[in-house]
Amino acid sequence: MRRLLAMVKWLLITVVRVPLLWFMVCWTLYRMPLWNADTTYVGAIHYKFIEIDLSNRGIFESLCGNTLVRLEGQPELYIPDSDMQRLWAESPHDMRVKGYTYRVQVTAARLLSGGIGVGQVGPLERLQQAPHISK
């Protein structure tokens, strides 16, 4: 009986420690910026309706409350969900009918691991052209 209880105890400790260790490693990889390395990315928003991001970064950012955004001609960026609500205030299909899209400025820090940190959305500029929409 003691042996069974000891196994259950170590199993529970492992179940708690492994996700905690994963979260700490991801936090280090995706939050440690280079010094004075903020970069500004500007582009029209690429609206993608079905976004399945099962990468390690995607899972980590979704747990932290961040969303993937795509800008034309720029790398994939993560922004807070509250900023994403500003970018998707209206359905992109309705925007296509009305004939406008947005150009946005996102400022993000370069990371020590070589990636791009979570960005902050700057001012939105309304463009008189159809939005780029994909599935």
Image: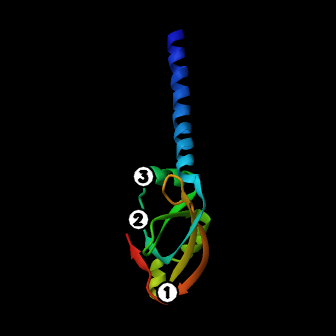
User: Image quadrant for the C terminus?
Assistant: bottom left
Q: Residue at x 53, y 43 (%)?
A: 25
| Disc ID at residue 5 | none
| Disc assigned to residue 50 | 2
- 55, 84: nearer the viewer: 55
Three-letter amino acid code at disc 2?
Ile
Q: How far is disc 2 from disc 1 in space, using C-alphas?
A: 21 Å
Under circle 1, the secondary element is: loop
- Disc nearest the viewer among 3 and 2: 3
* Percent of width and height locating residue 34: 58, 57
Specify the label residue 100 is tagged with.
1
x and y percentages locating residue 3 in the rendered image: 50, 11
Which one is earlier in the sequence, the residue at label 3 or at label 1? Answer: 3
Amino acid marked by disc 3: Ser
Going 56% across and 47% down the picture, which residue do you hit? 28
Query: Against 65, is 45 above or below?
Result: below
Residue 32 in percent (x, y) is at: 58, 52
Q: Which residue does the image show at 49% across and 90% down from the upper left?
A: 128
Q: Where's residue 24, x and y in %?
A: 57, 42
Mark 3 or 1: the one toward you: 3
Q: Is residue 33 above or below residue 44?
A: above
Instruction: Specify the farthest residue to the front.
Output: 35
Camera-side residue of 4 and 83: 83
Front in this rendered view, residue 1 or 19: 19
Local packing at callout 1 (Cα closer than 10 Å; few below 14, some 14-19, many 20+) is some
The mark that comes first in sequence, 3 or 2, is 2
Task: Give the Cα separation between the discs numbered 3 and 1.
Answer: 32 Å
The kind of secondary structure element at disc 3 is loop
